[in-house]
Image (cartoon, helix red, strand yellow):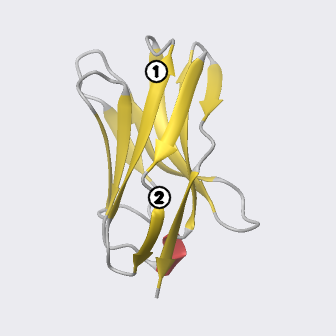
Amino acid sequence: QVHLVESGGGLVQAGGSLRLSCAASGSTSSVSAMAWYRQAGGNQREVVAVMNIRSNERHDINYADSVKGRFTISRDNAGSTVYLLMNSLKPEDTAVYYCYAIRNGLNYWGKGTLVTVSS
């Protein structure tokens, strides 16, 4: 089991920044990828950033087109926390942001943290 807890959401004005954190615990060894998703209103959950974890620390990272150049996913040295630094936030970034991990073919989700960007 992998337990994920997000934090760092809140209310921010357009153009501002927030950093989300995802604390992972439990059986975190062999986690092959971690990601951030978001879901706004009645929309489907969409991927924001994905980190495919490599043992040499040269992780393969991909971003949704809508956040490229503004958001950065990173991981601490211990591998227990994943971050999402969000700059130049826009009202359309308003959503519940979820942390995701996959380990041995099983998917794990956090409960989400709300980000609200005011215009």
Q: Name the residue under label 1.
A: 32
As drawn, 116 above or below 5: below
- Which comes before the other along the chain, label 2 or label 1? 2
Structural distance between the alpha carbons of marks 2 and 1? 25 Å
Q: In this view, does 38 lie to the left or right of 64?
A: right
Decide: few, some or many residues near mark 2? Use Cα within 10 Å; few <14, some 14-19, many ≥20: some
As drawn, 103 above or below 72: above
Decide: few, some or many residues near mark 1? Use Cα within 10 Å; few <14, some 14-19, many ≥20: some
In-front residue for pair 36/18: 18
Q: What element carries label 1?
A: strand
Rendered location of residue 100, percent (x, y): 55, 36
Instruction: Please tell me whether mark 2 or mark 1 is closer to you in this view.
Output: 2
One can see residue 15 in this view: yes
**Which residue in the rendered view is the most extreme toward the bottom?**
119
Rendered location of residue 5, percent (x, y): 52, 37
Q: How many marks do you count on the picture?
A: 2
As drawn, 112 above or below 24: below
Q: Mark 2 points at which residue?
A: 9
In-front residue for pair 48/97: 97
Q: Residue at x 46, y 16 (%)?
A: 28
Q: Residue at x 41, y 63 (%)?
A: 67
Work out which quarter of the rendered image holds the N terminus and state it. Answer: top right
**Residue 118's disc number:** none
Q: Which residue is drawn at 30% across and 66% down?
A: 87
Q: What residue type is labelled 1?
A: Ser
Q: Residue at x 29, y 63 (%)?
A: 69
